[in-house]
Amino acid sequence: MGILKQRPIQAVIAAVVGLVVLTSLLTGILVARASKPSKVGYLRIQAVLNNWPSFIDANEEFNEYAKQLQTDYKERLEEASGDKEKEALLKEIQDKMQKTNDEMVAPFDAILEKAIEEAKAHYGLDVILSPDYVITGGVDVTEMVTSLVNEYSEAAN
């Protein structure tokens, strides 16, 4: 009878050992997945903008428009009577500038976003940051994005 009593104890021990091994394996798999580092890229956005002729031209065009609005504002301000009229005039000019800026920037935003996504996919990156946030490592995608935005801009024209 002693042997029959030992078998259930051995089965329990085997089950516990099996459970411990299984738990260890699952924990190892989860830790391995959780600790897998992300692939990070970085983009020097100002370098892209400084080397994007279409964007530079549009920026100069907007600056000329803004100067014209300021001239118009000064002339109309001299004719305005009262603070409320001056405030309304200022709001009108600000709204015009904002609307024009939004309209001019939208196509460039779309091109830039497309170029960033293509660079991200090309390098298999999970995220692209400003270099200010990358202390070490990472992939510099600035040249590729610059090339792509210029290519896309030419194709759009």
Image (cartoon, helix red, strand yellow):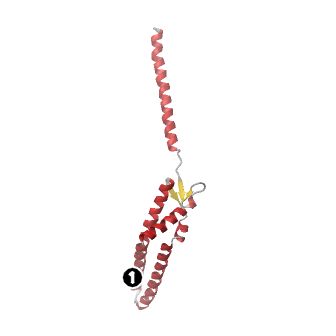
Q: Is 151 or 108 nearer to us in this picture?
A: 151
**With 5 as the anchor, is 132 left or right in this view?**
right
Residue at 59% from the left image edge and 54% from the top image edge? 137
| Res 48 seen here | yes
Question: Amino acid under label 1?
Answer: Ala
- Check disc 1: other Cα within 10 Å, few if <14, some if 14-19, many if 20+: few
Q: Is 61 or 152 nearer to us in this picture?
A: 152
Q: Looking at the picture, how far across and down is residue 84, in whole percent?
A: 39, 84
- Residue 42, quarter of the rendered image: bottom right
Residue at 48% from the left image edge and 35% from the top image edge? 26
| Res 43 seen here | no
Q: Looking at the picture, how far across and down is residue 21, in whole percent?
A: 50, 29
In the rendered image, the vertical position of residue 119 relative to residue 24, given as above or below: below
Q: Looking at the picture, how far across and down is residue 101, in whole percent?
A: 43, 75
Q: Looking at the picture, how far across and down is residue 123, in whole percent?
A: 51, 54
Residue at 48% from the left image edge and 61% from the top image edge? 116
In the rendered image, the vertical position of residue 148 relative to residue 121, given as above or below: below
Q: Which residue is mark 1?
A: 88
